[in-house]
C-alpha cells in the first residue's frame, strides 16, 4: 500500500490555472502507474488523466476528451510526486480531484480505469467560478 496526499486545489476564475500535486509515501515510486480522477456533486467519479512509469525518461499519458489540450499530467520520480497542470479552467471542471496509484509490472502502461487502482488519496477540491 502507498499513501497519497494531494494538494494544490482551490478557487479560481474561469480561464485560470491550477497545479495539483500528489506525493506518494512509497519508495520506490517508479513502479506505480498514476492517475487523476474527479468527482463533481451528484456525479460519478470520472477519469481525468493517467501516466505510466518508465525505467528511462519517456512516459506515456492519456487524457479524458474533456480535458485534452488543457490539462497536463507529469511525474517526478525523485520527488515521489505526480502533477496535474490545469489550464483554461471551466466551471465544469469543478470537482474533488483524486490521485490514484497502482503497481504495474510493465513500464509505459497507462491505466485509465478507476477499478484498476488500489491506492487513493483523500482528494482536493477545485472550484472554478464563472
Image: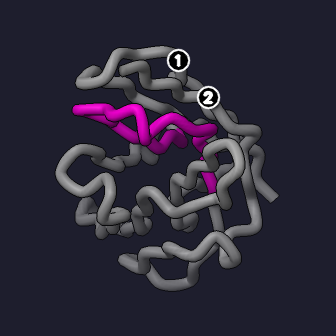
The image shows residue 88, relative to residue 59, as above or below, that is above
Protein image colouring: one colour
Name the spot of residue 90 as percent of width and height, x first.
Answer: 33, 34
* Local crowd size for mark 2, using a 10 Å CA cut-off: few (<14), some (14–19), many (≥20): some
Residue at 54%, 42% in the rendered image: 80
Q: Which residues are magenta?
A: 80-100
Dot 1 falls on a residue whose secondary structure is strand
Name the spot of residue 83 as percent of width and height, x first.
Answer: 42, 39
- Extreme-right residue of the structure: 1
* Local crowd size for mark 1, using a 10 Å CA cut-off: few (<14), some (14–19), many (≥20): some
- Residue 125: numbered disc: 2
Dot 2 falls on a residue whose secondary structure is strand
- Please give the residue where the numbered disc 1 appears in the rendered image: 10
Residue at 30%, 69% in the rendered image: 60
- Extreme-bottom residue of the structure: 106
The image shows residue 25, relative to residue 54, as above or below, that is above
Using residue 91 as the reference point, say whether residue 38 is left or right of it.
right
Q: Is residue 86 magenta?
A: yes
Question: Who comes first in sequence, dot 1 or dot 2?
Answer: 1
Residue at 72%, 44% in the rendered image: 121
Name the spot of residue 25 as percent of width and height, x first.
Answer: 71, 42
Mark 1 in CB contact with mark 2 (< 8 angstroms) = yes
Amino acid at each position: 500500500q502507498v499513501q497519497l496526499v494531494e494538494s494544490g486545489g482551490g478557487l479560481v476564475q474561469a480561464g485560470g490555472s491550477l497545479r495539483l500535486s500528489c506525493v506518494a509515501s512509497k519508495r520506490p515510486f517508479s513502479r506505480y502507474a498514476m492517475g487523476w480522477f474527479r468527482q463533481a456533486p451528484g456525479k460519478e467519479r470520472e477519469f481525468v488523466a493517467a501516466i505510466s512509469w518508465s525505467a528511462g525518461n519517456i512516459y506515456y499519458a492519456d487524457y479524458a476528451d474533456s480535458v485534452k489540450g488543457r490539462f497536463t499530467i507529469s511525474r517526478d520520480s525523485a520527488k515521489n510526486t505526480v502533477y496535474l497542470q490545469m489550464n483554461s479552467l471551466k466551471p465544469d471542471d469543478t470537482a474533488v480531484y483524486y490521485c490514484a496509484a497502482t503497481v504495474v509490472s510493465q513500464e509505459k502502461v497507462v491505466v485509465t480505469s478507476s477499478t484498476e487502482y488500489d491506492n487513493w488519496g483523500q482528494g482536493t477540491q477545485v472550484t472554478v467560478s464563472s
